[in-house]
Amino acid sequence: MSRLAHLKRSLKPFFQNPRLHFTKPPIFSNPTSEIPHFLNPRNPFVSRGFSTTPPLSSPSSSSSDAEIRKYIGYAALLLSCAAATYYSFPFPENAKHKKAQMFRYAPLPDDLHTVSNWSGTHEVHTRNFVQPESVKELESVVRVASEKKQKIRPVGSGLSPNGIGLTRAGMVNLALLDKVLEVDKERKIVRVQAGIRVQELVDGIKEFGITLQNFASIREQQIGGIVQVGAHGTGARLPPIDEQVISMKLVTPGKGTIEVSREKDPELFYLARCGLGGLGVVSEVTLQCVERQELVEHTYVSNIKDIKKNHKKLLSDNKHVKYLYIPYTDTVVVVRCNPVSKWKGAPNFKPKYSKDEAMKQIRDLYHESIKKYRGEEQEISEFTFTELRDKLLALDPLNKDHVIKVNQAEAEFWRRSEGYRLGWSDEILGFDCGGQQWVSETCFPAGTLAKPNMKDIQYIEEVLQLIEKEQVPAPAPIEQRWTTSSKSLMSPAYSSAEDDIFSWVGIIMYLPTTDPRQRKEITEEFFHYRHMTQTQLWDQYSAYEHWAKIEVPKDKDELAALQSRLRKRFPVDAYNKARRELDPNSVLSNNMLEKLFPLGNPI
């Protein structure tokens, strides 16, 4: 027997993001494999088997006495071995509360970094994790990696649900390249290093009275990463975030550092702007910003019938709008945000319910469920709604009836939370996404702002019908947002028509437990849920997944179908041609990129 070693190394600058899980106990997995986190045992200790030799039996006048003595001997030997093992090889203090599992693999060496995405759904172990402190150092890292044909995949904040930036072969992270380099207040243009986080950027430029045009749900992404995956906010008059980029610098293995913009090599610029990290390491980004504004957020509860009646007006009259659908209910939460009126000012609104009153039904459901499932009750008075929802779902996450009760409690929470909120755009436009989760988000055309085709609402109706027909234990919410088109060729919202609008719909299943078996069961159920929407809806609505949420199929036929489908929507040949020129040794790619866009013959 050998005592297990702790496998983590400290990467302080990379771990400052509270959503990243780089300091959790390591997973015992094969260091030569890159596999989803849920397939790995999470226990940092080992259950040891025992090997005993039965003692020789002594003659006895009574066979029953001999049997008793024999089993007493077995028990004594077993207990003594167990005690010796426990005190000779004690478990780490932080592991004693976890369930033991049989040891499956050899312990990982101490020099391996364990890096996972925020949801814990994808994880890799690598010896090659680099954080350059200057652009010059970054250029050297990329050049040497190309010469040695050593992978150096760019990875941002690790927030992508599919782990698009991960590879065990080697990664480079720009967390230390996080400066605001230049601000042009008059033209509202900023130039920044690509490792700066969104929140750090908006904090750094607010004194100039400017901010970003739109935001995704959270603020912890690095600018390079949020641009490269084609992230988005919401607003049928506002494009995805990559459209805010007017120029950028790429550190490439094949051509060194190059600058691309709308004027300088526009063909490559529009290809690389949403380049998935495969055409170069983005080192600098120049962004077109807008005037910083106070917004009024109005949240209210509606239903499908009223949404269909008012949908066109909601899209056209609101700068930002999104819908949150609660499965197994008729509840649709509408959240709309607009600049404060210079003439009317902020609305004078007094909430009908207090925070405690809004939380009452879900707290009551928690106490009721704890008794039913005989769980250990916790003090919940300080829990947010999303934290308490996670606690409830963890009790029985795949029981449809239990999930329906949680959804009904959520619908009531939103009904009692109707009202207005005032704040700056970078404060108002965020959204508490909840805990660790699997998510699939699709993007599809929805007509024009002047003439929405209503397919976005039809899509949602079919998803909700599918959930009820197949009895999917689907938690809330199903989130629906909109953007106008992007000129980035690899964006799911790409269109040459500026007035086209696109709808983005996300389905979800939470991972509220650390138990490996339960996480695996949730994962299987989620992919069944996702597969049903894929086979029944995606082709019909020309829907394509968000690059940070697409998952690579393991089945060869499914992978071939996905490759073919991507070719119909995106300029894959042009993208691969640029990859060959800018990254001739494929050091910036990983398994995901190589499977989605094979440089040789597709599978």
Image (cartoon, rainbow, N blue to C red):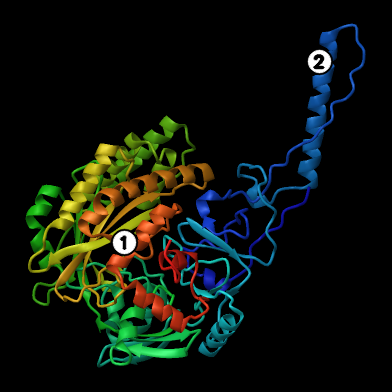
**Residue 38 appears at what percent x and percent y?**
51, 50
Q: Nearer the viewer, residue 182 or 128?
A: 128
Q: Nearer the viewer, residue 537 or 48?
A: 537
**Residue 55 appears at what percent x and percent y?**
88, 25
Which image quadrant: the C terminus? bottom left
Q: Name the residue tied to disc 2.
A: 68
> From what the image shows, is residue 211 above or below residue 503?
below
Image mark count: 2
Dot in front, 1 or 2: 1
Instruction: Give the SS element for disc 1.
Output: helix
Q: Earlier in the sequence, mark 1 or mark 2?
A: 2
> From what the image shows, is residue 184 above or below residue 374?
below
Instruction: Give the SS element for disc 2.
Output: helix
The answer to whether the residue labelled 1 contacts the one labelled 2, judged by CB atoms less than 8 Å apart, is no
Label at residue 565: 1
Q: Nearer the viewer, residue 334 or 134?
A: 134
- Left or right: 3 in relation to 456: right
Rendering quarter of residue 23: bottom right
- Left or right: 308 in relation to 493: left
Q: Nearer the viewer, residue 459 or 267?
A: 267
Whether residue 381 is visible to the viewer of this picture, yes or no, is: no
- Left or right: 124 in relation to 552: right
